[in-house]
Amino acid sequence: MTNSDVLRRIRYIFDYGDDKMIKLFSFGDLEVTRAQVSQWLKRDDDEDYKLILDKELVRFLDGFIIEKRGRREGAPPPVYAKKINNNGILRKMKIAFKLTDEDMVKIFDLVDFEVSKHEINAFFRKPTQRQYRQCKDQFLRMFFFGLEKKYKVEKPKKQD
């Protein structure tokens, strides 16, 4: 998944408008414009599309965590990573929702994707550990589909 895919999925699942997206970036200590957000969210084949860098996505995800959990009391300012991969994205989503391994298994069950707690745990290990596993795009995509089933609120249809 591209960084823009992650941004689009979160925006869609939680029905965030541009103002909310800008606010989440600011929670992650990154000031962005509406034009930047718009360019990042465009389809990859659009001529106005701009790639969102890893360091910008990290700031957004950190802002998303703050939105969901609140700021940590007495903690020093966070150190922002400059690179992020699917494992890091999955970790930040787990933190944002305070998910346990069991919670994650249930999210995958919502989309009929079988996974064990041990498999999930392997994504959160250090890359140097023997049991570490790289999170593939399909796995992360299925996780977002599960989040969508769990958290997406359908808007009521307009009556004529």
Image (tube, rainbow, N blue to C red):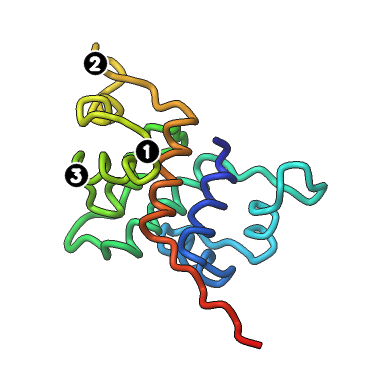
Tell me: 83 left or right of 120. right
> Looking at the rendered structure, which numbered label has been put on residue 112?
1
* Element carrying mark 3: loop
* Residue at the disc numbered 2: 131
Location of residue 100 in the rendering, given as x and y in whole percent from the top left corner = 19, 44
Tag 1: Cα neighbours inside 10 Å, few (<14), some, or many (≥20)? few
Question: Which quadrant of the structure image shows residue 76?
Answer: bottom left
For marks 1 and 2 on the same chain, the one whose residue lies earlier in the sequence = 1
Q: How many numbered callouts? A: 3
Residue at 61% over, 86% down: 159
Residue 105 image position (x, y, % from top left): 26, 39
Earlier residue among tags 2 and 3: 3
Lateral position of residue 95 relative to residue 146, left or right: left
Look at the numbered disc 2 and give the secondary structure of its residue: loop
Graded by Cα atoms within 10 Å as few (under 14), some (14 to 19) or many (20 or more), the crowding at tag 3 reads some
Left or right? Give the position of 55 relative to 32.
Answer: left
Reply above or below: 48 against 119.
below
Residue placed at 45% from the left, 26% from the top? 136
Closer mark to the observer between disc 1 and disc 2: 1
Residue depicted at 31% across the width and 46% down the height: 107
Distance Cα–Cα, label 2 vs label 3: 19 Å
Q: Position of residue 83 (x, y in %)?
A: 46, 34
Q: Secondary structure at mark 1?
A: loop
Q: Amino acid at mark 1?
A: Asp
> Disc 2 residue type?
Gln
Locate the C terminus and report the quarter of the image it occupies: bottom right
Amino acid type, label 3: Thr
Q: Which residue is mark 3?
A: 100
Measured Cα–Cα span from mark 1 to mark 3: 19 Å
Task: Give whichever of discs 1 and 3 has the lower sequence position.
Answer: 3
Where is residue 91? Give x, y as percent: 32, 40
